[in-house]
C-alpha cells in the first residue's frame, strides 16, 4: 500500500493537499470572498450611486475583488500556502504582458468565432446599442477582476497545491478543471454540454499555466472570453445576462442549435466545446515544442519545518 501511495503522491504531499480537501478549502474561501465582495458592492452603490445599467454591471463583476482579498490573505497567513504567491507575480517566466495580451486575443478570438457561427446560422441576432470609451475600459477592468479571481482560485491555489502533492501533472491539470466545472454547476440554465465546455475551458487555462508557465495568459484568456460575450456582444455569460453591453441580443428570436443555447449561451454548444478542445490540443502541441518546465513555486520551501508546525 505504501509503495502504491508513493507512486501517486510526492514526498512533499500533506494531508491538506488531498483533492477533496483542497476543494473544500477553496469553496469556503470563495464563499467568504463573495460575501466580502457583496459588502464592497453595497458600498459602491451607496457612495458612488451606481444604479444605472453600467453601474450595476460594473458592480456585478467588480465584487469578485472580495475573492482576491480573501485568497491573498489566506496565502499570506498560512506558511504552507505562501509559496503559491510566487505564481502570481512576475517570477514565472511566462508572466509577461506579451502572454497576457496573447491570452486576451485567444479569449476574444475563440468567443467571437463561436458567436459568428451562431449568427451565420441565424440562431442569434445582435444590434449595436452604444459605445462609451470610459465604460469600455472600466468594464474591461471589472471583468478582469472577476475572471482572474476564478483563475486565482483554480489555476493558482488549486493547481499549484495539486502539482506539489501529486506526481502526475495531469492530476493538477484535470483536477482543478473538474473543480472549476463544479463551481458553475449551479448556474442558471446549466446542462451537461455546458459543463463539458466549462471543463474544456479549465483544461485550456491549465495548459497555459503549465506549458507556458503563465498564469497571466490564463487571466487574459478567461477575461477575453467573458468580456467578448457579455460586454461586447450582450450574450449570456455562463447563463447570466448583464444589463449593460455594447451590442444587444434579440432574445425573443434566439433559438437552440448546435451553436447556441437560449438558456446558457454559446458556452453550451457543440461549436464551443469543439473550439475549446482544439485550442487545448494547440496549447499542448506548442507547449511540448517549447520544452520548458514551469516554475516550481515550492522549490525554496522548507518542508522539514512545516512538519514541526500545526498548520
Image (cartoon, helix red, strand yellow):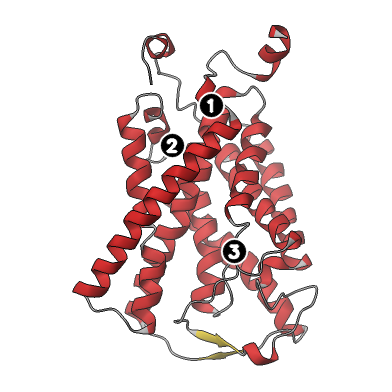
Q: Which residue is mark 2?
A: 87
SS label for mark 2 = helix
Q: Is residue 164 visible?
A: yes
Dot in front, 1 or 3: 3
> Who's the residue at 79% across and 77% down the image?
257
Dot in front, 2 or 3: 3
Q: Percent from the top left, x then y, of residue 293?
A: 57, 29
Badge number at residue 187: 3
Circles 1 and 2: CB atoms closer than 8 Å: no
SS label for mark 1 = helix
How far apart are labels 1 and 3 at the CA level?
A: 27 Å
- Image position of 157 with respect to 240: above or below: above
Q: In the rendered image, which quarter is residue 35 located in?
A: bottom left
Dot in front, 1 or 2: 1
- Image position of 148 with respect to 170: above or below: below
Q: Which residue is mark 1?
A: 17
Quadrant of the drawing holding the N terminus: top right
Q: In the rendered image, which quarter is residue 23 located in?
A: top right
Judge left or right: residue 188 versus residue 56: right
- Image position of 84 with respect to 217: above or below: above
Circles 2 and 3: CB atoms closer than 8 Å: no
Amino acid at each position: 500500500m505504501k509503495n502504491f501511495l508513493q507512486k501517486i503522491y510526492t514526498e512533499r504531499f500533506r494531508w491538506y493537499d488531498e483533492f477533496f480537501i483542497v476543494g473544500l478549502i477553496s469553496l469556503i474561501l470563495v464563499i467568504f470572498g463573495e460575501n466580502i465582495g457583496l459588502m464592497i458592492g453595497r458600498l459602491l452603490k451607496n457612495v458612488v450611486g451606481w444604479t444605472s445599467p453600467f453601474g450595476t454591471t460594473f458592480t456585478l463583476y467588480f465584487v469578485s475583488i472580495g475573492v482576491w482579498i480573501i485568497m491573498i490573505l489566506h496565502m499570506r497567513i498560512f506558511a504552507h500556502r505562501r509559496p503559491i504567491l510566487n505564481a502570481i507575480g512576475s517570477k514565472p517566466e511566462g508572466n509577461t504582458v506579451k502572454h497576457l495580451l496573447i491570452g486576451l486575443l485567444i479569449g476574444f478570438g475563440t468567443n467571437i468565432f463561436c458567436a459568428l457561427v451562431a449568427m451565420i446560422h441565424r440562431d442569434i441576432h445582435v444590434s449595436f446599442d452604444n459605445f462609451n470609451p470610459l465604460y469600455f475600459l472600466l468594464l474591461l477592468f471589472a471583468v478582469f477582476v472577476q475572471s482572474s479571481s476564478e483563475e486565482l482560485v483554480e489555476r493558482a491555489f488549486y493547481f499549484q497545491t495539486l502539482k506539489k502533492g501529486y506526481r502526475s501533472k495531469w492530476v493538477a491539470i484535470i483536477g482543478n478543471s473538474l473543480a472549476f466545472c463544479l463551481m458553475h454547476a449551479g448556474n442558471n440554465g446549466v446542462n451537461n454540454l455546458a459543463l463539458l465546455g466549462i471543463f474544456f475551458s479549465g483544461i485550456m487555462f491549465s495548459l497555459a499555466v503549465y506549458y507556458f508557465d503563465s498564469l497571466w495568459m490564463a487571466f487574459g484568456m478567461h477575461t477575453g472570453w467573458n468580456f467578448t460575450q457579455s460586454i461586447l456582444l450582450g450574450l449570456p455569460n455562463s447563463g447570466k445576462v448583464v444589463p449593460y453591453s455594447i451590442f444587444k441580443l434579440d432574445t425573443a428570436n434566439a433559438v437552440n442549435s448546435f451553436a447556441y443555447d437560449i438558456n446558457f449561451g454559446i458556452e453550451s454548444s457543440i461549436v464551443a466545446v469543439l473550439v475549446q478542445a482544439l485550442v487545448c490540443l494547440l496549447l499542448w502541441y506548442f507547449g511540448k515544442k517549447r520544452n520548458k518546465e514551469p516554475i516550481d513555486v515550492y522549490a525554496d520551501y522548507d518542508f522539514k519545518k512545516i512538519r514541526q508546525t500545526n498548520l
